[in-house]
Image (spheres, rainbow, N blue to C red):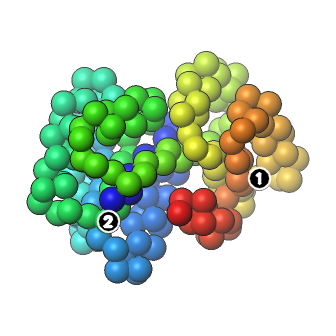
Amino acid sequence: MYVYILGGFLGSGKTSLLMKLASMYSERKEKVAIIVNEAGEIGVDGATLKAQGYDAIELPSGCICCTLSGSLTNALTNIKNDIDPDIIIIEPTGLALPNKVKDIVHKSCIDEDADIIIGIADIQRFNDLIKKKEEFFTRQMTGSDFILINKSDLATPEQINDATSWLKERFPAKDIVPVSVKDGTNLDRVYEMMQ
């Protein structure tokens, strides 16, 4: 069983990527389970995913790397016992630290084959984010196995180059890939990196 954790600030495109990944794995006839962590009381993502026919568990009103860590552990155990999927995709709230989520996955004893954190940066809000929340954003991306610069279809080559340079300077060992989850640009490369 593979566990994928999507990390990124609010509005970076985590849910859109989650939908693409779930669809891709379902087309390959692999069983997918999804855990969505909503910060608010009403979980739109969870309802949308269930309507699409996915096994989705919602953990609302809190953060799974802090106040809801026990709930995440229980959810993982229940998914393993009840669904036994090939793939689990976890979408924490945009305020979570994905490396803490990964620690909880390790402690849950679900016997995963691999776990990968996919960091997602929104190119449209990249400069504002690093001006206002640089420390938090850096901590959020630290545990990522690779980082996607999303919404590349809405950016100039200069914007992509600037964001790539900034990220490469701080995370020299990580692959940085410009993508557009919306139009599918470079998603084939992302799928290859997830293997």
What residue is disc 2 on?
A: 86
Residue at screen point 23% across, 29% down: 68
Which residue type carries mark 1?
Ala
Residue 129: percent from the left, percent from the top? 64, 29
Q: Quadrant of residue 145?
A: top right
Residue labelled with disc 1: 155
Residue 152: x and y, percent? 71, 56
Residue at x 34% of width, y 80% of height: 29
Give SS at disc 1: loop
Residue at the (18%, 35%) spot, across then down = 71
Determine if residue 112 is in view. Answer: yes
Q: In the figure, is residue 144 to the left or right of 111?
A: right
Name above or below for residue 149 compared with residue 25.
above
Using a 10 Å C-alpha cutoff, classify the residue at mark 2 as few (fewer than 14 neighbours), some (14 to 19) or many (20 or more).
some
Going by the image, does 90 lie left or right of 120? left
Q: Are there few (<14), some (14-19), or many (20+) residues within 10 Å of tag 1?
A: few
Sequence order check: which comes first, mark 2 or mark 1? 2
Secondary structure under the numbered disc 2 in the rendered image:
loop
22 relative to 167, above or below? below
The furthest residue to the right: 158
- Can residue 187 be seen here? no
Q: Residue 121: where, in percent of width, then height?
A: 62, 42
Q: In front: 66, or 163?
A: 66
- Depth check, front residue: 15 or 146: 146
Horizontally, residue 23 falls left or right of residue 59, namely right
Q: Are marks 2 and 1 in contact (CB under 8 Å)?
A: no
| Along the viewing direction, whichever of 140 and 106 lies nearer the viewer | 106
Q: Is residue 66 left or right of residue 124?
A: left
Could you tell me the amino acid type at mark 2?
Asp
Total count of labels? 2
**Residue at 40% across, 29% down:** 100
